[in-house]
Image: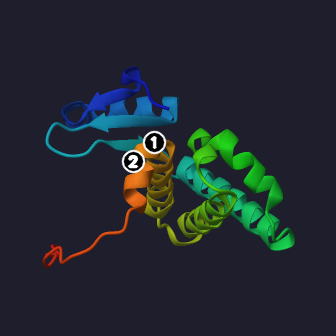
């Protein structure tokens, strides 16, 4: 994790690129803040390649565990430790969450699709959030009726 001391402004980078690059090399990774755009990180390519290799290895280990243990018992038991809110999910939901997350991590490692894993986590956390509140959960289970009018899809 980066701290504010590990950050420079985009203006700093444009005014002093050599010193900013040296600092990034020394720290391993440096956050560059930008007032009018998302922040980004300045890091050495070899460090990022090592990070990618680590993600690929971890993803392949999880996939192999699931392949050799169809119940994925070890992963299922670990999920509430990693995601405490998963305790509000049923056993089947934890299994589905685990499979979706491992698939998304594989996509991140093998296909550079980094947003899928966070989307899976966010969606399952929302499910757990609703199930954790008995009133909200009962409301979500109530049948609906009637026409709710057309839904506009915007790109």
The answer to which of 88 and 44 lies nearer the viewer is 88
Count of numbered circles in the view: 2
In the rendered image, residue 142, in percent from the top left (x then y), is placed at 38, 62
The answer to which of 31 and 120 lies nearer the viewer is 120
In the image, taking residue 32 as reference, residue 111 lies left or right, namely right
Which residue, as the protein is rendered here, is positioned at the far top?
5
**Residue 97 occupies which quadrant of the picture?**
bottom right
In the rendered image, residue 130, in percent from the top left (x then y), is placed at 44, 49
Q: Quadrant of the C terminus?
A: bottom left
| Circle 1/circle 2 CB separation < 8 Å | yes
Callout 2 crowding tier (Cα within 10 Å): few <14, some 14–19, many ≥20: few
Rendered position, 148 above or below 23: below
Tell me the CA gap for discs 1 and 2.
5 Å
In the image, taking residue 71 as reference, residue 108 lies left or right, namely left
The answer to which of 146 and 133 lies nearer the viewer is 146
Q: Badge 1 is on which residue?
A: 133
Tell me what residue is drawn at x 65 percent, y 60 percent: 98
Tell me what residue is drawn at x 18 percent, y 33 percent: 11
In the image, taking residue 39 as reference, residue 64 lies left or right, namely right
Callout 1: SS: loop
In the rendered image, residue 86, in percent from the top left (x then y), is placed at 60, 47
Is residue 65 among what the camera can see?
yes
Callout 2: SS: helix
In the rendered image, residue 38, in percent from the top left (x then y), is placed at 25, 45
Circle number at residue 136:
2
Tell me what residue is drawn at x 52 percent, y 36 percent: 28
Callout 1 crowding tier (Cα within 10 Å): few <14, some 14–19, many ≥20: few
Tell me what residue is drawn at x 37 percent, y 35 percent: 31
Is residue 21 among what the camera can see?
no
């Amino acid at each position: 994790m980066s701290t504010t001391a590990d950050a420079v402004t985009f203006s700093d980078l444009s005014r002093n690129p050599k010193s900013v690059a040296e600092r990034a090399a020394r720290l391993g990774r440096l956050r560059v803040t930008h007032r009018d755009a998302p922040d980004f990180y300045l890091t050495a390519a070899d460090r990022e390649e090592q990070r990618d290799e680590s993600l690929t290895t971890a993803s392949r280990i999880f996939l192999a565990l699931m392949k050799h243990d169809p119940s994925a018992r070890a992963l299922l038991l670990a999920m509430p430790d990693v995601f405490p809110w998963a305790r509000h999910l049923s056993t089947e939901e934890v299994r589905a969450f685990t499979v979706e997350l491992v698939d998304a991590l594989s996509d991140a490692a093998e296909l550079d699709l980094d947003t899928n894993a966070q989307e899976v986590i966010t969606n399952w956390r929302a499910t757990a959030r609703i199930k954790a509140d008995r009133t909200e959960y009962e409301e979500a289970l109530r049948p609906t009726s009637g026409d709710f009018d057309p839904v506009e899809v915007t790109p």
